[in-house]
Image (cartoon, coloured by chain):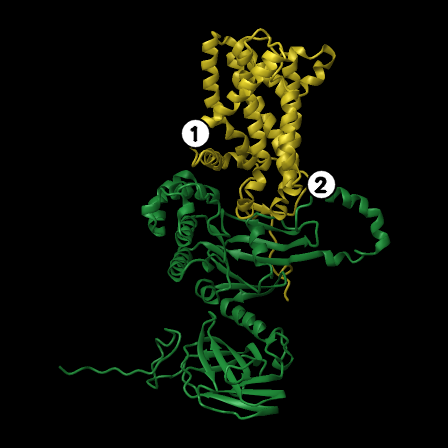
Chain colours: A green, B yellow
Amino acid sequence: MILLSGEIDIRVRGLGKKYSIGGSQEEYLTLRDALVNVFKIPFRRLTQKDVDQSTNEFWALRNVSFDVHKGEIIGIIGRNGAGKSTLLKILSRITTPTEGEADIFGRVGSLLEVGTGFHPELTGRENIFLSGSILGMRKSEIEERFDEIVKFSEIEKFLDTPVKRYSSGMYVRLAFAVAAHMDTEILIVDEVLAVGDAQFQKKCMGKMEDVARVGRTVLFVSHNMAAIQKLCSRCLLLVSGEVYKDGPVSDVITTYLNMSASVGGVSLAKRVDRKGNGDGRLTALFINDSPDDQIASVCSGDTVRFHITFKIQKPISSPIFYLAIYNNMGTQIIHCNTELQGFEPGPLHGEGEIVCEIPRLPLPPGLYKINIAIGHGGGGEIVDHVESAALMDVLAGDFYGTGHYRFLNRGICLADHRWRFIDS
Amino acid sequence: MISLENVLPHPTSGDPEPTIKIRPPRRWVPVDFHELGEYRELLFSFVSRDVKIRYKQTVLGFLWAIIQPLFLMVVFTLFFGRIANIPSDGIPYPLFSFAALIPWTLFAEGLTRSSTSMVNNANIITKVYFPRLIIPISGILSPLVDFTIAFIILLLMMAYYGFVPTIAIVFLPFFILLALLTSLSVGLWLSALNVKYRDFQYTIPFIIQIWLFVSPVVYPASMIPQQWQFLYALNPMSGVIEGFRWALLGTNPPQGMILISAVVVVFLLVGGLFYFKRMEQYFADVV
């Protein structure tokens, strides 16, 4: 655990939020339903239907405690439904906790959605004031920053058109521009970077980095590991509503990806989240000599061997094996398959092992996931397909054979190249 | 899994007071007037938004503010004034009913808007924090613009009939305030109830229709038999409308009636505030 000196901006102790599911809270009740429920009570005991109270309750958050110090940028990660948004909603005072408490020292600006308060009938100008006001800015503050906001959003020409006429890109740019100019000491941000096109996302990241530089305290929820890694110093991993890990960003992200890959420590053979017709099964994936339940470490430029073991129940006459490598943003960088290499395995049946060898791994340092699959050749059915069969941690290595490593992390793949002057 | 509760330091008495304290829901939540004051700009933004969008893309725009009471007045004059021959305290019937319709419309519009205000603003109450009271309050304030326009027409009508307001006109703001507080108090109850039980939005047009006839809009309060006068006065709008007519047209002052009305409003308002503040803690989960 990190011990930081400095003032505490947010103090959370034992926070929990319970929802009752199955009718009473999910949808609104009509008065008729409420009255009918009153009459149902004496009959309920006879039918034994909801003897088990616990199945009607759902703890979105349980026993969450942590401190946030001034100037810390904390990432909050976890699978969908882990409780991240609920935590942010509670700290933003939108919903109340069922138990526990939180103390906040300073003003909070919440960015939980892009375009909060925008009204389609009002113009861009009017919406800047309305939205800014709803987000907590004073009129004088909005006036001060008005020009910056307009410049950031690039909608000068359309300032006096109703927002319902804007394209979705313009809308999102304007909405974010307003929110980006909140200057509260504490910021709570929920995955807003996921909207918009690539250029917009770059702008958002830039703004977030500015915020980080200035020393504001930020709680940032995202699925984008690259963004989390770039902006945050510390990270909280939520699993089923509880804090599973709280520590330095890279450690927590590694734990998270590891969890996603092995699905809680289950080996490849036993994993149930697979696709394909099931005529065969991929039973293990070893990278070089690493055991299959740990993250393999290799270096850029290394020769990497992917050993795949399999068990085929129904014979495949012309099989094709696939191996794909994805970076931490989910982009497929490398795709290998037996057909591309002109390798024909011949009819397969029963158990076996195949190796895919990449001679000089052209990947920059980072965390990668490997998907593997086996199917019938010639556009046939997929027999078995497993995502995140293994994780691979690529460290900086001497890919170019020159001993120079400095720019190795630029770009998403490394390419052989040569430089020379042209004599005139 | 780790539990940090025993490892993290607990606050000691020397620490500074937190700006924001987040705690589980309580039964009785006081109204934070100081906070409401801090958010007054937001209140203005909401009222401004509602006023602006009301007549967007309409041709007649603000004329609609006078068309409705004017038409009602014509219909009432024809059927209640002429045909049914209902007395009007010595005042020409058109003026008599129009003078009542102006504060009535302020109340009815305010009630209608504030009752559905929470549900209509569901998209922002689930995303940002601000004192939720601002929303129903903005609901009762936005009809003031329509009210002002119709009031000018009323003054013109008074001039046409040769009526000059008496000194009692200084009490007019009081009656306006009473109308606003009545619509606010009922609006608080209805908007909070409507979040959870959507039935309530359907009760509003019907509540307003009945309320119209229970108030002295088409007939004077003096027509009510003596033994029912007290019960009649429990309707705050009785005091408001009679008071309005007295302040502008010089009919009999409402006296006892207004006292009863004011007391009723105070009770409704305080009750409404408490109920709203308690349910406020659940709005975002239920809306």
Is residue A107 shown left or right of residue A20? left
As displayed, is residue A368 above or below residue A207?
Answer: below
The residue indicated by pointer 2 is: A31
Camera-side residue: B51 or B253?
A: B51
Q: The residue under label 2 is which amino acid type?
A: Leu
Mark 1 surroundings within 10 Å by alpha-carbon count, few (fewer than 14), some (14 through 19), many (20 or more): few
What residue appears at the point 57 percent right and 72 percent down from the top-left corner? A260
For the N terminus of chain A, give its image quadrant.
Answer: bottom right
Q: Position of residue B175 (x, y in %)?
A: 56, 19
Q: Dot 1: what SS?
A: loop
The disc numbered 2 marks a residue on which chain?
A
In the rendered image, is residue A291 in sight? no
Q: Position of residue B159 (x, y in %)?
A: 45, 10
As displayed, is residue A343 above or below residue A214?
Answer: below
- In terms of image quadrants, where is residue A205? bottom left
The disc numbered 1 marks a residue on which chain?
B
